[in-house]
Image (tube, rainbow, N blue to C red):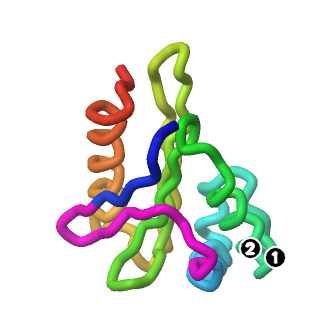
Amino acid sequence: MTDRIELRTERLLLRPYSLEDVDDVLAYCSDKELAQYVPGLPQPYTRSNAERYVARKLLKSWDSNPSFAIVLDSTVIGGINLLIDRKKETGELGYGIARTHWSKGLTTEAAGVVVDMAFDKLGLA
């Protein structure tokens, strides 16, 4: 079983989701423009949607789907995850970040540390 871990970058903390993240998830997922780029993100996005999302992230196995809340200055501004295919030793990266943080290199920063972790700790090829 893969342990839930935290990753750090120069500006970000990537950590497992917690129940306290619901309000932050609601805030960034309510943006209709973000929804254009995240398949299946309902609009309008409700508190109930955010609660279900966080609950799913807490219950999913990190062996097949490690998921991180992207935290900047104590606020969850997005999420990033891997969907792992153990047979092929590959992973698919998924992410979403609040529009107010687009074009600042934050997603690239988060993706880099997650990809490094996938190769170094999860043995993906």
What x and y, as percent, mark residue 116? 27, 40
Question: Residue most toward the top?
Answer: 87
Displayed quadrant of residue 73: bottom left
Asked whether the residues under the numbered discs 2 and 1 touch, taking CB atoms below 8 Å apart as contact, a structural biologist would say yes
Q: Residue at x 81, y 76 (%)?
A: 48
Specify whether 44 is left or right of 16.
Answer: right
Q: Residue at x 46, y 74 (%)?
A: 77
Instruction: Please rate how many residues cluster around mark 1, counting C-alpha atoms within 10 Å: few if below 14, some from 14 to 19, many from 20.
Output: few
The circle on residue 57 is: none
Please state the total of marks drawn on the protein image.
2
Specify whether 77 is left or right of 117.
Answer: right
Residue 60 on the magenta segment: no
Displayed quadrant of residue 27: bottom right
What x and y, as percent, mark residue 15? 42, 64
Residue holding disc 2: 51
Specify whether 15 is left or right of 40.
Answer: left
Q: Nearer the viewer, residue 52 or 111?
A: 52
Amino acid type at image mark 1: Ser
Q: Residue at x 78, y 71 (%)?
A: 49
What x and y, as percent, mark residue 63? 54, 36
Instruction: Please rate how many residues cluster around mark 2, counting C-alpha atoms within 10 Å: few if below 14, some from 14 to 19, many from 20.
Output: some
Residue holding disc 1: 48
Relative to 52, residue 84 above or below: above
Cα–Cα gap, marks 2 and 1: 5 Å
Q: Residue at x 39, y 55 (%)?
A: 5
Question: Which stretch is magenta?
Answer: 8-21
